[in-house]
Image (cartoon, helix red, strand yellow):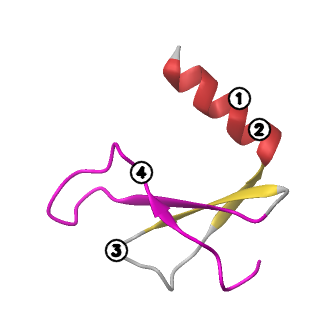
Amino acid sequence: MPRALAWRKSSYSGGANTDCVEIASTGSRMAVRDSKNPTGPVIAFPVVKWQAFVAARRA
């Protein structure tokens, strides 16, 4: 996974640095991490799977 990803925080993340999720695109995958632990683990999903997840959450 590239180190220089452009991370962005979810608009649904809570205030005051709690419940923060960040995502970044690697091109073919969407990376997800806990913004309170930026050097911690990152999970990545194929873009198609991420799009299906987002669509299901919106429905």
Q: Residue at x 29, y 56 (%)?
A: 19
- The type of residue carrying mark 4 is Ser
Find residue 17 and report its horizontal and vertical position in percent: 22, 66
Mark 4 and mark 3: Cα distance apart in space: 13 Å
Residue 49 circle label:
2
Mark 1 and mark 3: Cα distance apart in space: 26 Å
Which of label 4 and label 3 is nearer to you? Answer: 4
Specify the segment rendered in magenta: 1-26
Which of label 1 and label 4 is nearer to you? Answer: 4
> Sequence-wise, which precedes: disc 3 or disc 2?
3
Does residue 59 lie above or below 54 as drawn?
A: above
- The type of residue carrying mark 1 is Ala
> Sequence-wise, which precedes: disc 1 or disc 4?
4
Tell me whether circle 1 and circle 2 mark residues in contact (CB < 8 Å): yes
Find residue 14 and report its horizontal and vertical position in percent: 23, 51
Mark 1 and mark 4: Cα distance apart in space: 17 Å
Mark 4 and mark 2: Cα distance apart in space: 18 Å
Query: Label 1 belongs to which residue?
Result: 52
Q: Residue furthest right?
A: 28
Tell me whether circle 1 and circle 4 mark residues in contact (CB < 8 Å): no
